[in-house]
Amino acid sequence: MKRGKRYVEAAKLVDRATLYDTAEAIALVKKAAVAKFDETVEVHIRTGCDGRHADQQIRGAVVLPHGTGKTVRILVFAKGAKADEAEAAGADFVGAEELIPKIQNEGWLDFDVVVATPDMMGVVGRLGRVLGPKGLMPNPKAGTVTMDVTKAINDIKAGKIEYRLDKTNIIHVPVGKVSFTEEQLADNFQTLMDAIVKARPSTLKGTFLKSVTMTSTMGPGVKLNVVKMTN
C-alpha cells in the first residue's frame, strides 16, 4: 500500500517499537495529524476475548466528558407522547412505521444513532438487515432502547459513544478531534478505558487488553503501554 508523502513524514515521528504513556501518545497523535481537516482521534483496543462466546461479548456505552467533537444526528422511533418528547428533546428525526420503506427501499441513512422505545422494536426489527451491519440497531445495553428518550438524546448529544467487539475482537472508538487540547483527549481516553476495563468478562482467562493503539484519521498508529492500564 503506497502511503502519501505527508503520512511517511508523520510516521517518522513514531517509534513502532515503543509503547508510549498516554500523555506522550496523545502529543504524538496531535503532532502527526497533518491532514487539512480536523481529524478524529480514534482508539483501537485489541482484546483477548472470543466474541463467538456470548459470555465474552463486550458491548456498552459511555459518555465522554468533552464529547466527540462531532455533531450527531439522532433518529428516534416512537409514537404519541414519546414522539413529542423526542422532538422536544432535540431529536433530528422522529417517526414510526412510515420510515421503514424510506430506509429499506430508498436507502435513507442520514442519521448516526437510532433510539427506539421498547414498543417500537417490532417495527425496528424489520430493518435489522439494513441497520445491523452498520452498527445502527438500537440496543438496551447501549441505552438506545428506552422509554426515557429525553435522557438518551441528551446523553448522545453530550458525547455518548458505543463500544463493541468487531469480528476480530477489536474495539474501535473515537475519543475526540485533533483540535481538542491534550487534557481533553486524556480525560476522554481515561473515561473510555475505565469503562472498558470494568466491562472485562468474568469468564475470560488470560490477558484482557492485548494492545491499545491511538491514531488520527489519516495519521500513523501510536501504541500505548497497556500494563499501566491494568490487566
Image (cartoon, rainbow, N blue to C red):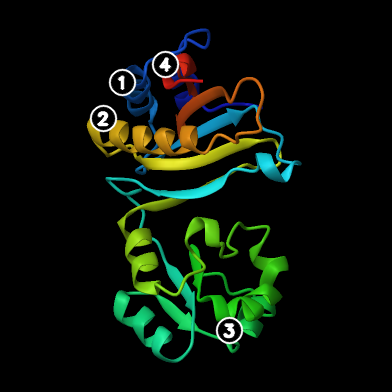
The numbered mark, 3 or 4, whose residue comes first in the sequence reads 3
Circle 3 crowding by C-alpha within 10 Å: few under 14, some 14–19, many from 20: some
Is 228 situated left or right of 31 in this image? right
Disc 3 + disc 4, Cβ < 8 Å: no
Provide the secondary structure element on which disc 4 rests.
helix
Q: Quadrant of residue 128?
A: bottom right
Q: Is residue 39 visible?
A: no
Q: Which residue is mark 2?
A: 182
Q: Are marks 3 and 1 in contact (CB under 8 Å)?
A: no
Quadrant where the N terminus is found in the figure: top right
Residue 170, image x, y percentages: 61, 35
Quadrant for residue 32, please give it. top left
Residue 184 position within the rendered picture, expressed as x and y whole percent measured from the top left: 25, 36
First along the sequence among labels 4 and 2:
2
- Compared with 210, 198 (above or below) is below
Q: Residues within 10 Å of mark 4 (few under 14, many from 20)?
A: few
Q: Nearer the viewer, residue 121 or 18?
A: 121
Q: Which comes sooner in the sequence, label 3 or label 1?
A: 1
Tag of residue 228: 4
Disc 4, disc 2: CB below 8 Å?
no
Q: What is the CA distance from the residue labelled 4 to the residue labelled 2? A: 19 Å
- Mark-to-mark CA distance, 2 and 1: 7 Å
Give the residue type at disc 1.
Ala
* Mark 1: secondary structure: helix
Direction front: furthest residue: 202
The residue sitting at 46% across, 50% down in the picture is 61
Question: Residue at coordinates 66% horizontally, 39% vertically from top-left?
Answer: 56
Q: Position of residue 124 (x, y in %)?
A: 62, 76
**Disc 2 + disc 1, Cβ < 8 Å:** yes
Mark number, residue 23: 1
How many other residues sit within 10 Å of disc 2, few (<14), some (14-19) or many (≥20)?
some
Q: Which residue is mark 3?
A: 99
